[in-house]
Every structure is written in structure tokens, then in C-alpha cells.
Image (cartoon, rainbow, N blue to C red):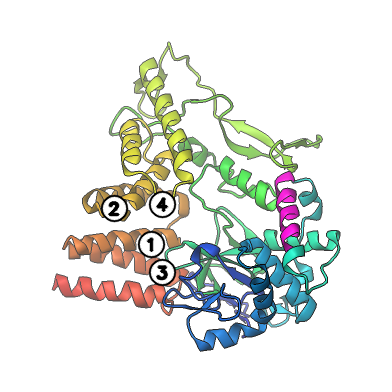
């Protein structure tokens, strides 16, 4: 299947499809094994491959379509059984096989009528990888697996293999399902031309393994050098986003959003004690609390970051309080005074929340009681757009849905919507999904008129991010809209 791309100098409107592409190589996540088809990635009834007993297909069509790619893998998976090959090793093996036995070295992925990218065009960041201990340990472990797994293929030497590994980890996309959950990994050559911004003007969405890039903002003309998507989750401080990008992609993000001082003031802000004032109050709550990384303004030698070997710019810390706590902090907007007790209460709430957010990151589902207790400590203390407050609400909302506690889920959804708009923007798939989930609960509670409002909000975003032919729009949103209309009449 050829790439579908937009080839025009005319004005780009929000929602316009810029590029559609099939993966150069992809792998279904092992956690989805037996739940989804290894070819189309659709969820449903699947049957094991009779040869390797490892991969699954939804039917004969997908099995036949995948055979040219799977036949070499089938025998190897059977030979090493019952060992399970890690996803990254399978992905790298598929890339090696396509380069050795297929059209991998000559394949051209077009993003315009005359412009294309090939495997060799992808950046490997070889020198950055060599200095990154964590990545080098991962690479070494993959090599051990590959030498056992690919006995029928002559593997490249270590330098070439590391170049392949670098191209894979730097350029891979996480394949998402309709609920924006990770279900696999794919390398898309044409889409790898897209750079990152924390304030993107385009979005990548998936229908199975097919990736689509759509504009989320009006653009005067199509210039691929100016098209930006987000590589990471945006509900974080600028410092956390920059750190993640440094660790995974080896660049310091200096986009306008990361450098926006108005965001710096909000991400760790306290709430003003005056209930009618929305002004954020900045209170240093721990030593060396950094909200953004800024590049050195002089040409001094850059220091090596202790977390991985890449360079690290100047760290901007939270501003010092102009008055001492004894004199009393005052809101810059309304002049409301903060006492030492108020400051201590804020610091304890931030420390408590940080500890529990770290614990919940590794859990399959957030703990409802822990989230509630965190939110109680935050009430009237943390600013409504404080990132830790937003993250706690997000965990709590998902947990309440998991345990079907609908009334509280509705209350948290209302509080979460402004947070999503602030951190993700007005045209992000996650905001559309939040409206959609909220609407489903409202329909269950027989509040059809309010459900209809949130479904229309979701529809407005999904038409831009996914298009009106995407299964999420056609098969999930439209039936709910029809239900809401019928129940309202």
C-alpha cells in the first residue's frame, strides 16, 4: 500500500490529512498477545499460528498477508520456545530481516510527490548512544537475545548493529488504540521527518497499524520543516518534558511552550487564599526545584548530565520569595497574605502528592482511596492547574471509572477538563476522549442533554484529530450522539 500524502502549496486547514503511512516494521506489544491480531492489530477472537504457537491472527486474510514477513520468524520462534522474545528484540529482528532479505535498503517512503525517506536517512545518534549507559545496557541485552534467536541470519557487526538499534529506538512510534493506550511499536519512514514541539500543529493517530498525520492548526502552506507533533505526554512540567526528550531523543526542547514563563508560574503553584482570585502563588517547596532547563547564553563548555551522558543546559529554579515567610507572602494580584502555616501546609501537600504519584506510576490502576486522600490534602492549597493536582485528578478519574463509581467520576471530570485544555490544548485526542468518557457516564446517569453537549465537544475535536471516517468517530461517537438525541427528544 502506497503512502497517501498531501502535495499542495494551498492553505492547510485544521483537520486536513497530511500523510498516511504503513509501517516499515512493527510489532504488537506482548501484553496484547492473544487479545489482538498480530497483523491488523484489531482486538477480538484470534487463533494461534499453527507453526510457532506464538503469534495470533483474526482470520485467513491477515495470516496470508503477514506470511511473507512472518515465515522466517515462525521457525525461529518455534525453535526458542517456550522462551518469550522481548518486543524490542522482535522489532530489531524484523528490521534486520527486511534489510537482509527484502526491500529494506531500497524502500522509499514518500511524503510528497518527489520527496521520500529511506532507512539509511534515519538518524542513529550513534555517539549519544555510546555515552548513554542505560541504552547501551539495553542494546547489550538485545544482542544476546538476537544471537540466539537469529541463527539463520548473518548478523551485522557490532557497529552496524548499534546503528540499526539507534535508528529503531530514536524513530519508533508507539502505536495507540482508540483509547490512546499503547498496543505496539512501529517504524514509519516518511513520518520520521516530523520534529517535536510541546506546542504542536499536527497530531499522529492510528487505525490499527496505519498512521495518519493531521493538522491541528491552520497553516499558510505545507512545509514539512515546520510541521510539529508531540513525542511525549504533555501533562508535565517543562523541566520534566525536556528531561524526557533529552533522555530518549538527545535534544533540549526550547519550544515557545517550554520557555513560556506564564506556564512556569502555574505548574507548581499554590492557590491564592482569596477564593475569588486565580493568581498562582509560587512557593519553593523543595531544594533545587527546577521547572525548566534553559540553554547557556555563553559559549561555555556544557556539563555532562549525570543521568545519561548528554549535555545539560542551565537549570532555572523556582524564583525566591521576595519577602521572608516571617514577613508574610502576599499575592501579587490581590495582596492576600500567606502565613508560615499556609506555606508549610502547601509544602506538605506537594511532598505527599509527589510520593504517591511516583508509587501510582508503576501500578496497573490508581488507588481510589489514595487519590482521594491526595485531593483532600490539595483542596484549597494547590492551584487548580498545578500539574500534580492535574495528574492526581487524571489517576482518580480513571480509577473511579474502573470501579464504576460514577457520581464521583463526574465531579472529577468537570475539574479535569480545564487541566486537559491547559496542558494538552484545545485540539488534542486526549481531551476528546475525556469528553467522550464523561458523556458515556452522563448517558448512564440519564443526563442526556449534558451528555449531548460533551459529545459535541468531543466530535468537534475528533473531526480534526481523527477525521469523520475513523472507527473512533464512526463506531463509538456517532452511536452515542444518536442515543443522546433520542433520549433528549
Q: Earlier in the sequence, mark 3 or mark 4?
A: 4
Q: Is residue 134 magenta?
A: yes
Q: Is residue 428 magenta?
A: no
Q: Characterize the local packing of mark 3: few (<14), some (14-19) or many (20 or more) Cα atoms within 10 angstroms.
A: many
Residue occupied by mark 2 = 403
CA separation, marks 1 and 2?
A: 19 Å
Q: Quadrant of the C terminus?
A: bottom left
Q: Secondary structure at mark 1?
A: helix
Q: Earlier in the sequence, mark 4 or mark 2?
A: 2
Q: Earlier in the sequence, mark 3 or mark 1?
A: 1
Q: Characterize the local packing of mark 2: few (<14), some (14-19) or many (20 or more) Cα atoms within 10 angstroms.
A: few
Residue occupied by mark 3 = 462
User: Which-is-in-front pick, marks 3 and 2?
Assistant: 2
Residue 484 found in image quarter = bottom left
Image point (40%, 20%), residue name: 344
Q: Disc 4, disc 2: CB below 8 Å?
A: no
Asked if residue 120 shows in the view, the reply is yes
Q: Disc 3, disc 2: CB below 8 Å?
A: no
In this view, the residue in front, 482 or 356, is 356
Q: Quadrant of the N terminus?
A: bottom right
CA separation, marks 4 and 1?
A: 11 Å
Q: Point out the stretch of residues depicted in magenta.
A: 133-146
CA separation, marks 3 and 4?
A: 15 Å
Q: Earlier in the sequence, mark 4 or mark 1?
A: 4
Residue occupied by mark 4 = 420
Q: Secondary structure at mark 2?
A: loop
Amino acid at each position: 500500500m502506497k503512502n497517501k500524502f498531501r502535495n499542495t502549496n494551498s492553505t492547510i486547514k485544521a483537520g486536513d490529512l497530511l500523510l498516511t503511512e504503513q509501517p516499515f516494521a512493527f510489532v504488537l506489544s506482548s501484553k496484547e498477545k492473544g487479545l489482538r491480531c498480530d497483523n491488523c492489530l484489531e482486538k477480538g477472537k484470534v487463533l494461534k499460528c499453527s507453526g510457532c504457537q506464538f503469534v495470533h491472527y483474526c482470520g485467513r486474510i491477515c495470516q496470508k498477508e503477514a506470511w511473507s514477513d512472518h515465515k522466517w520468524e515462525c521457525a525461529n520462534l518455534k525453535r526458542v520456545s517456550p522462551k518469550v522474545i522481548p518486543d524490542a528484540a522482535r522489532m530489531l529482528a524484523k528490521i534486520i530481516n527486511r534489510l537482509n532479505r527484502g526491500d529494506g535498503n531500497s524502500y522509499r517512503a514518500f511524503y510528497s510527490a518527489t520527496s521520500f525517506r529511506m532507512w539509511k536517512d534515519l538518524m542513529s545518534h550513534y555517539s549519544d548512544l555510546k555515552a548513554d549507559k542505560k541504552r547501551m545496557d539495553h542494546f547489550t541485552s538485545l544482542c544476546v537475545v538476537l544471537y540466539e534467536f537469529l541463527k539463520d541470519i548473518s548478523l551485522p557487526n557490532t557497529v552496524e548493529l548499534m546503528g540499526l538499534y539507534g535508528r529503531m529506538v530514536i524513530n519508533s512510534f508507539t502505536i495507540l488504540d482508540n483509547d490512546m493506550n499503547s498496543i505496539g511499536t512501529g517504524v514509519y519512514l516518511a513520518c520520521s521527518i516530523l520534529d517535536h514541539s510541546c506546542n504542536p500543529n499536527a497530531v499522529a493517530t492510528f487505525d490499527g497499524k496505519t498512521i495518519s498525520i493531521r493538522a491541528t492548526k491552520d497553516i499558510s502552506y505545507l512545509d514539512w520543516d515546520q510541521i510539529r507533533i508531540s513525542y511525549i505526554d504533555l501533562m508535565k512540567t517543562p523541566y520534566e518534558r525536556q528531561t524526557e526528550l533529552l533522555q530518549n531523543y538527545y535534544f533540549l526542547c526550547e519550544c515557545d511552550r517550554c520557555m513560556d514563563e506564564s506556564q512556569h508560574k502555574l505548574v507548581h503553584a499554590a492557590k491564592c487564599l482569596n477564593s475569588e482570585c486565580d493568581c498562582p502563588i509560587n512557593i519553593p517547596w523543595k531544594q533545587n526545584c527546577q521547572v525548566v532547563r534553559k540553554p547557556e547564553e555563553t559559549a561555555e563548555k556544557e556539563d555532562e548530565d549525570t543521568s545519561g551522558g548528554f549535555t545539560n543546559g542551565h537549570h532555572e529554579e523556582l524564583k525566591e520569595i521576595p519577602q521572608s515567610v516571617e514577613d508574610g507572602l502576599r499575592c501579587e494580584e490581590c495582596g492576600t497574605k500567606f502565613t508560615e502555616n499556609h506555606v508549610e501546609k502547601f509544602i506538605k501537600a506537594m511532598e505527599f502528592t509527589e510520593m504517591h504519584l511516583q508509587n501510582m506510576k508503576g501500578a496497573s490502576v490508581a488507588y481510589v482511596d489514595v487519590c482521594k486522600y491526595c485531593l483532600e490534602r490539595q483542596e484549597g492549597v494547590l492551584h487548580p492547574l498545578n500539574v500534580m493536582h492535574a495528574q492526581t485528578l487524571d489517576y482518580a478519574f480513571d480509577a473511579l471509572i474502573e470501579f464504576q463509581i460514577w457520581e464521583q467520576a463526574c465531579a472529577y471530570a468537570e475539574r479535569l477538563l480545564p487541566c486537559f485544555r491547559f496542558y494538552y490544548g484545545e485540539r488534542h485526542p486526549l481531551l476528546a476522549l475525556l469528553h467522550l468518557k464523561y458523556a458515556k457516564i452522563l448517558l448512564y446517569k440519564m443526563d442526556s442533554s449534558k451528555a449531548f453537549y460533551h459529545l459535541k465537544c468531543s466530535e468537534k475535536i475528533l473531526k480534526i484529530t481523527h477525521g469523520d471516517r475513523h472507527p473512533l468517530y464512526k463506531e463509538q461517537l456517532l452511536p452515542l450522539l444518536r442515543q443522546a438525541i433520542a433520549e433528549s427528544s
